[in-house]
């Protein structure tokens, strides 16, 4: 497979070429690194969110939007399909790079992680990237500066001028779209955490409703988690049957049965205080090649409607 950073840079070039049409604002830092504002100080939009999700998956997934319903109300949904789930989702889209600085807090996803390759997913997939340019999508309420670009460049082993940082707040249209595009990624991640070999996941498709935007990042975090945990649906084709397949869906409905805003508030908004099992899609079908087909979980549209404020 060719470099996923090279493929992501091509998508970043598309964002730069159509920045006005996408309501995306690019900035060049003093270091020569490029920041693309997808939803911090600009409005962004649905199309910007789709392109952002394509960048996060390095062009290895097909991402579209469609109209669906939540408790009878028309709501846009994001759909993602990929035949390269291990690399596209675990080695690229997963938000596995913490950016914790004195004056900046963010979470990084995208193919830059594959240039570092320190997470266990890379060893499991046997995939590491090499390229002289890199892309790290940053979820933050602030735009990154030269300190962040320098940090990314140092760890990724590239020049600062070769760093591209698409950035978005979760409380934005693009942020809501990108978050809902994670339903398949969370399914594959849950299988991996349960001990399933990610190379045995052949393909995955999934969808989730786009949650209404809140400029309160806490509420945005709650709604985007609800969108996936109570509204996300995935279909996986896998090579091997295993008890780990039972772990693919969220247990939020069974363990808590209420919107994530209430769950987070009860845990003092400590994301890490919650069990990992509550994250993931609401429902899944797992098709074992030449074997059984399993159905797990179900959507909870009444709860989603409450979360979305209908």
Image (cartoon, grey):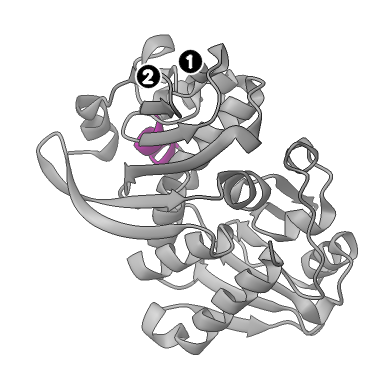
Task: Check residue 295 for magenta coloring.
Answer: no
Q: Residues within 10 Å of mark 2 (few under 14, many from 20)?
A: some
Residue at 47 percent across and 84 percent down: it is 19
- How far across and how far down the image is residue 141, in percent? 57, 58
Quadrant (top left, top right, bottom left, bottom right) of the C terminus:
top left
Q: Nearer the viewer, residue 137 or 111?
A: 111
Q: Main secondary structure of the magenta part?
A: helix
Range shown magenta: 222-229
**Disc 2 and disc 1: Cα gap in Å?**
9 Å
Q: Nearer the viewer, residue 240 or 3?
A: 240
In the depicted structure, whether residue 95 falls above or below residue 246:
below
Which of discs 2 and 1 lies nearer the camera? The answer is 2
Residue at 63 percent across and 24 percent down: it is 196
- How far across and how far down the image is residue 286, in percent? 41, 27
Q: Secondary structure at mark 1?
A: helix
Residue at 55 percent across and 75 percent down: it is 11
Residue at 74 percent across and 54 percent down: it is 113
Q: Which residue is mark 2?
A: 294
| Residue 45 seen | no
In the depicted structure, whether residue 77 falls above or below residue 238:
below
Q: Contact (CB < 8 A) between labels 2 and 1?
A: yes
- How far across and how far down the image is residue 39, in percent? 47, 66
**Which numbered disc covers residue 246?**
1
Count the numbered circles shown: 2
| Residue 109 seen | yes
Q: Secondary structure at mark 2?
A: strand
- In the rendered structure, the answer to whether residue 195 lies left or right of residue 41 reads right
Name the quadrant containing residue 130.
bottom right
Tell me which label, 2 or 1, sits earlier in the chain: 1
In the depicted structure, whether residue 297 falls above or below residue 42:
above
**Which numbered disc covers residue 290?**
none
- How far across and how far down the image is residue 241, in percent? 53, 19
């Amino acid at each position: 497979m060719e470099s996923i950073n090279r493929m992501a840079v091509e998508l970043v070039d598309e964002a730069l070429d159509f920045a006005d049409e996408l309501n995306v604002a690019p900035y060049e830092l003093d270091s020569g690194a490029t920041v693309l504002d997808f939803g911090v100080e600009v409005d962004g939009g649905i199309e910007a969110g789709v392109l952002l999700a394509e960048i996060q998956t390095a062009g290895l997934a097909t991402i579209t939007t469609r109209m669906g319903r939540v408790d009878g109300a028309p709501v846009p949904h994001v759909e993602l399909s990929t035949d390269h789930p291990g690399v596209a989702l675990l080695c690229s889209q997963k938000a596995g790079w913490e950016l914790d600085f004195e004056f900046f807090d963010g979470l990084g996803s995208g193919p830059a992680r594959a240039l570092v390759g320190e997470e266990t997913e890379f060893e499991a997939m046997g995939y590491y990237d090499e390229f002289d340019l890199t892309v790290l999508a940053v979820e933050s309420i602030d735009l990154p500066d030269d300190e962040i670009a320098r940090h990314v460049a140092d760890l990724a082993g590239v020049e600062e001028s070769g760093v591209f940082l698409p950035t978005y707040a979760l409380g934005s249209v693009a942020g809501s779209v990108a978050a809902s595009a994670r339903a398949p990624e969370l399914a594959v991640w849950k299988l991996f955490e349960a001990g399933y070999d990610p190379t045995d996941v052949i393909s995955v498709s999934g969808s989730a409703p786009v949650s209404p935007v809140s400029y309160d990042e806490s509420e945005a975090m709650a709604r985007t988690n609800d969108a996936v945990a109570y509204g996300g649906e995935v279909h996986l084709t896998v090579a091997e049957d295993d008890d780990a397949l039972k772990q693919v869906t969220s247990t939020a409905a069974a363990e808590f049965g209420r919107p994530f805003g209430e769950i987070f508030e009860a845990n003092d908004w400590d994301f890490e205080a919650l069990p990992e099992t509550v994250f993931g899609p609401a429902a899944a079908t797992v098709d074992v090649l030449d074997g059984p087909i399993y159905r797990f979980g179900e959507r909870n549209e009444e709860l989603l409607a409450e979360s979305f404020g209908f």
